[in-house]
Amino acid sequence: MTQNKVTLDSRVVAVTVYTDRAQVTRSVTIHCDKGEHQCVFENLPDTIEQKSIQVNGQGGAILRDVAFRQVYFSDIADGTAQQLQLEAQTVSDNISEVDDKISQIKKEKKFVDAITESLTSNTEKSTINQLDPEKWISMVEFYRAKLSDLDQQQREAQYTKRDLDNEHKKLLQQIQAAGRQGKMRNQVEIVIDCMAEGEQSIELSYIVSGAQWQPFYDLRVSGETRRMELSYNGVIHQNTSESWEGVRIKLSTAQANVDGQQPELSPWRVNEYRPPAVSDSRGIRLKRSKSQPSEPLMQQMMPPPAPVADGEAWGNDVLCGEAMAGGAPMAAPASTVETKTSSVVFNISGENTIPNDNNAHKVTILIEDFSAAFRYSCVPKLSPYAYLKARVKNTTPYPFLAGETNIFMDNHFVASAHMELVAPSETFWTYLGIDESMKVEHKFIKCHKNEAGMFSKVVSYNYQYQFEITNNKSATEEIVVWDQLPIAGHEKIDVKLLEPEYKQDSERLKLNEYRYIEWLFTPAAGEKLVIPFKFSVEHPVDMQIEGLE
């Protein structure tokens, strides 16, 4: 049967971006007569993963064949490459002009040096004795000024040449890349069998590398309302060799680079090592020498197949002979969230343009408002400030991925920070900066050394500190005070907490494995707390210790 060959003028309409790649969907609508048609998608990206290609459509035609091809050309017909070559030639001419200028400057410097040497050399023809002091000084000043001017001109010319060399190098790289693109282009050819004359909508989707996205957050907290507005953004980078202009964007949390199937164990055997015999070129079995390495214990695993989103992997056995579904095309998605079994997909509202420039392009995923509980935290031993924190519960049905944040308090920038992964219904904390209305003081009271009696076998050091917390806020606030006990590095060194009294962790007092102490206090408005902190360190008399303050 005769086939009509059609080059499709398709455009990118949708992109799903993963953390290290993207799934691109192209769409085109054509008018077909009854019969078979060979349709070609041209100029596909260099980074396309062949095994990820899928073809779908609607209009009642039957998909007969799908083939990926790399078409080679003998010449570069790309106008962009020709323009780059013209630019490179212009830059090369400019470099030649600068080289000539540098050469001329060097000659002038040699000429000035030669004149000076002839005037100052002690020869019979020297005119140095004919110069009076004023003329001598004028000659020296002229020499110095002229050389200084020539040195400055040479430096400026060398700086210009350096910039031109860098520009020329970049243009040559772009020409080389354009040449590769011109000599080899990726195509997908499909054969469809139209049952009747009419419109056919065809979609081609494929995975490309060179694309990624990361979350980025703006956290805006109001001290008056004690609420947090969280702006959840996606920062997209892509250099896939094609630009995405006016497309629907989805951001997926799926780990596309991880095989979805659980790896399986293989038997692990331990046996006596017996060097395998090897044969020489005549087929004679030889004993392996000690210098020859043995075979690896484990074979390398084959790399997992490329991931395919929202569909099965392509193949003629799957696609060929199936009728394309009819009906209305899918509507453009609103700004919504799809929660799947093992991932979340964010549908970005509207149409977005992401150029092929590998620069950061930010899209807004969502903006949510949360109630925030405030708490202060301080480490008086290290800092005289109280740090305000906000505790927020993720009440959304989707996770907040780990990412960088900008934090604002009452519309003032506070800091940049890193947010860890926050699952739905999980609580997270964020620092909001210092608040000097909560005053913190740390005082060393005394250290008493005790060697009781002449027969004492131990030495005891009793340390006493005092913390003062003053709440100058207009309401009762929570504040956590942190300090620490020394960690004994020897079984004969004994460290005891004397005050506060501690038996086990409670809501008010906690002691962790690193001997960090965490107190929780709730001072009323205007209240001043005086908090004693005492501990002792004992060790044998004949032992010398280190590490105490």
Image (tube, grey):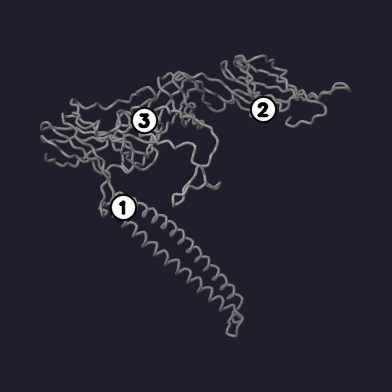
| Rendered location of residue 416, percent (x, y) | 50, 32
Q: Quadrant of residue 257?
A: top left
Q: Which residue is mark 3?
A: 251
Horizontal side, residue 447 vs residue 151: left or right:
right
The Cα–Cα distance between marks 2 and 1, rounded to whole angstroms, is 64 Å
Q: Which corner quadrant holds the C terminus?
A: top right
- Which residue occupies the foreground of this view, 47 or 339? 47
The Cα–Cα distance between marks 3 and 2, rounded to whole angstroms, is 45 Å
Residue at horizontal 53%, vertical 42%?
A: 275
Horizontal side, residue 524 vs residue 294: left or right:
right
> Is residue 156 placed above or below 298 in the rendered structure?
below
| Rendered location of residue 230, percent (x, y) | 43, 25
Q: Which residue is mark 1?
A: 179
Q: Amino acid at mark 1?
A: Gly
Q: Amino acid at mark 2?
A: Lys
Q: Secondary structure at mark 1?
A: helix
Pointer 3 with pointer 2, Cβ within 8 A: no
Residue at the front extreme of this rendering: 284
